[in-house]
Amino acid sequence: MQENHFHLPSANRIGPLIASILLAFVLTRLIQSPQFTVSITLPGFYFALPLTFNAAMTLLAAGLSATGMEWLTRDHPALGKKTNLENLMFPTLTTFVIGVPLALLPNGAAWWIGFAVSAILLSSIFLAEYITIDASAPPYGLARAGLTALAYALFFIMATSLRFSGARMFLLTPILFIVAGVISLRILHLNGSDRWDFPWAIGIGIVCAQMGAGLHYWHLTPVQFGLALTGPLYALTLLSDSLAENIPVRRAATGPIIIVVIAWTSAFFL
C-alpha cells in the first residue's frame, strides 16, 4: 500500500522570512518621518500623491515576500523545472494589503491585535502556497480552499481600508483593478485546469474598479463598501469557473446572482 507524503517548508527558511516581513511593519511604528507630497499642477488639473515612510516600507515588505517565497519554494521536490511565479502572487499581495490597515490602526492594543492577525495570515498564506505546488499532496484540497477564502478576505480588507482611509478615486480604482484581477486570476488557476484566464481576470478587475468608482460617491460605511465589492468579485469568479466546466449559463449564473443579492442585502442592513 502506497503511503501519501507531502512536504512542508523548512522552518529555517519560513521562520526568518516571516519575521523579516513583520519587522518591517514594526519599524513603521518605531520610525517617525515627515510626509512628502508629489504634486502636478496644470490648467484645470491638480494631482497630489502623498509619499510616506509607511508606504515605502509596505512596498519593500511586498518585494521581500516575493523574493522570499521564490527562495522558499525552490527546495520543494515537486517544483522541478516548473515556474513558481503563481506561488509568489498571493504572498506578495497579502503583504501589500495588510500594510494598509496596519498603517491606519492607532497605537496600542488595536495595532498589536492587527499585527498578530497579520502574522497568522502571512504564515497561512506561505504554508498553503507551498503545499499547492504539489497537486497530489493529501492536504492540497484544504490548502486550495484556504487560499481561496483568504483571497476574498484580503480583498474585503483592502476595500474596507481604502474606504476608511478616504483614498481618492485616482488611487482607489487602479488598486481595486489590480487586486481584484490578481485574486481572480490566481483563484481560477487553482481550479486544477492549469489555465491562466487573463480575459476573465481583466474583465473582473474592470468591473470591480468601475463599481468602486461609482460607490465612491455613495454614503457608505467602510464595511458596506467592502461587502458591496467583495460580493461581485466572488460571484464573477465563480461564474467564470462554472462556465469553464461547461455548465449551462442559466445554471452557472444562479449561484453568483444569489451571492450578489446576499452581499448587497447584508451591506444595506449594516
Image (tube, rainbow, N blue to C red):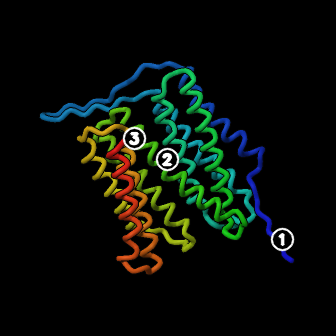
Which of disc 1 and disc 3 is earlier in sequence? Answer: 1
Residue carrying label 2: 154
Q: Please say whether residue 48 is visible from this viewpoint.
A: yes
Neighbours of disc 2 within 10 Å: few (<14), some (14-19), many (20+)? many
Disc 3 or 2, which lies upstream in sequence?
Answer: 2
Mark 3 or 2, closer to the camera: 3
Residue labelled with disc 3: 223
Classed neighbour count for the residue bearing mark 3: other residues with Cα under 10 Å, few (<14), some (14–19), many (≥20) = some
The label on residue 174 is none
> Split into 4 quadrants, where in the image is the C terminus?
top left
Relative to residue 34, is residue 268 drawn left or right?
left
Residue type at numbered disc 1: Glu
Query: Does residue 269 lie above or below 141 as drawn?
Result: above
First in residue order: circle 1 vs circle 2: 1
x, y percentage for residue 139?
70, 62
Q: Secondary structure at mark 2?
A: helix
| Pick the front one: 163 or 198 | 163
- Residue 1's spot in the image, x, y percent? 86, 77
* Inter-mark Cα distance, 3 to 1: 46 Å
The single residue placed furthest to the left in the displayed view is 43
According to the image, label 1 marks what residue?
3
CA neighbours of label 1 inside 10 A, class few (<14), some (14 to 19), many (20+): few
